[in-house]
Image (tube, grey):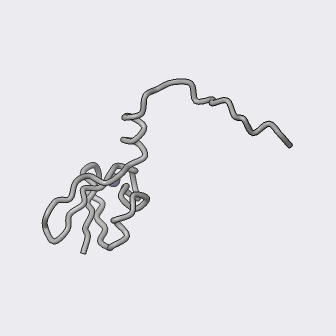
């Protein structure tokens, strides 16, 4: 069984749903959970906040070619 614990606020949750990125962030504060399986650490879960830090800041507007109606 997978177990997740938030390193920020201590929130804990258990379940196979933790294998999905959308369930790997803390329900309280959004921090990426520390995922463990059978006591072995699998790593830190996906968090939309940490993901934004890794992305390169730049213009968010991208030209679209979908102009035909
Ligand atoms: Zn938290």
Image quarter (top left, top right, bottom left or bottom right) of the C terminus: top right
Image quarter (top left, top right, bottom left or bottom right) of the N terminus: bottom left
Instruction: Please tell me whether residue 48 is drawn above or below residue 58 in the rendered image.
Output: below
Residue 40 placement (x, y as % from top left):
13, 64
Residue 2 placement (x, y as % from top left):
26, 70
Residue 42 placement (x, y as % from top left):
20, 59
Q: Quadrant of residue 59?
A: top right
Q: Residue at x 40, y 50 (%)?
A: 30
Residue nearest the viewer, comparing 3 with 62: 62
Q: Is residue 60 left or right of residue 14?
A: right
Residue nearest the viewer, comparing 66 with 31: 66
Residue 49 placement (x, y as % from top left):
41, 42
Q: Quadrant of residue 43?
A: bottom left
Counting labels gives 0
Residue furthest left in the image: 39
Q: Residue at x 33, y 73 (%)?
A: 16
Q: Is residue 66 left or right of residue 52?
A: right
Instruction: Please tell me whether residue 69 is drawn above or below residue 33 in the rendered image.
Output: above
Q: Residue at x 30, y 55 (%)?
A: 33
Instruction: Please tell me whether residue 26 is drawn above or below residue 68 in the rendered image.
Output: below
Residue nearest the viewer, comparing 15 with 69: 69
Q: Residue at x 37, y 70 (%)?
A: 17
Residue furthest right in the image: 69
């Amino acid at each position: 069984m997978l177990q997740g614990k938030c390193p920020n606020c201590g929130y804990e949750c258990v379940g196979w749903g933790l294998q999905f990125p959308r369930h790997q962030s803390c329900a309280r504060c959004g921090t990426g959970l520390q995922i463990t399986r059978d006591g072995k650490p699998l790593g830190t879960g996906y968090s939309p906040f940490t993901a934004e830090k890794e992305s390169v800041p730049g213009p968010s507007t991208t030209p679209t070619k979908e102009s035909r109606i």
